[in-house]
Image (tube, rainbow, N blue to C red):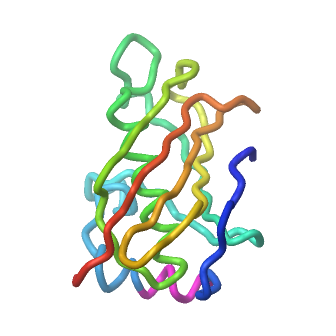
């Protein structure tokens, strides 16, 4: 994983904070939701370095171009990972800006991992980075800014 944290905040990330914020602010999330009910079924976990990660098997039905995961789903994966990185710190925030760089095609029907980490936080504004990896290569990376506010 190549994302590095540039600035730490006072609140240490924990799995308990992530789970509590998810249940409180995100109970019907498409990304985290049960695949039987139409969700993607990603299960994020807090990493020892404070980031979050999830592994996911991209269904073949998720393709845009033949055999390639739809770019909108890639953006959805990195956005959700960054939200969970904030949840792990007890922060509920919404996307203010999202930039995605598609480096290589993500093959539909194959597993991926998505990782996100906090870069900096000042007041209600946070900046995070995320990446989608498949078969040992970074396939997409993103940077997002998020604004904290009431649930």
The picture places residue 29, in percent across and down from the top left corner, at: 29, 64
Whether the magenta-drawn stretch holds residue 32 is answered as no
Residue at 37 percent across and 27 percent down: it is 70
Depicted 4 relative to depicted 16: above or below: above
The image shows residue 105, relative to residue 44, as above or below, that is above
Q: Residue 96, position in %: x, y?
A: 28, 56
The residue most toward the front is 122
Q: Which residues are magenta?
A: 14-20
Foreground of the two, 40 or 144: 144
In the image, residue 63 above or below residue 14: above
Q: Residue at x 75, y 69 (%)?
A: 49
Q: Nearer the viewer, residue 127 or 104?
A: 127
Image quadrant occupied by the C terminus: bottom left
- On screen, residue 125 versus residue 103, left or right, reads left
Left or right: where 122 falls relative to 104: left
Is the magenta region chiefly helix, strand or loop? helix
Q: Quadrant of residue 15?
A: bottom right
Tell me: 79 left or right of 81.
Answer: left
- Total numbered labels: 0
> Which residue is found at the position 46% from the left and 19% from the top?
68
Q: Quadrant of residue 46?
A: bottom right
> Up-down: is 118 above or below 130?
below
Give how far across and how far down residue 80 sits, in percent.
Answer: 41, 56
**Residue 132, position as x, y percentages in the image:** 58, 39
């Amino acid at each position: 994983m190549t994302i590095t944290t540039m600035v730490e905040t006072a609140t240490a990330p924990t799995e308990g904070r992530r789970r509590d914020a998810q249940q409180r602010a995100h109970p019907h999330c498409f990304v985290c939701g049960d695949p039987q009910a139409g969700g993607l079924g990603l299960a994020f976990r807090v990493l020892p370095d404070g980031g979050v990660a999830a592994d996911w098997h991209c269904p073949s039905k998720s393709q845009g171009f033949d055999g390639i995961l739809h770019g909108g789903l890639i953006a959805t994966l990195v956005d959700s990972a960054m939200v969970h990185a904030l949840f792990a710190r007890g922060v509920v925030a919404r996307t203010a800006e999202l930039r995605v760089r598609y480096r290589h095609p993500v093959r539909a029907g194959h597993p991926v991992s998505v990782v996100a980490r906090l870069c900096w936080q000042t007041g209600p504004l946070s900046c995070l980075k995320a990446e989608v990896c498949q078969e040992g290569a970074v396939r997409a990376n993103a940077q997002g800014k998020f604004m904290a506010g009431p649930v």
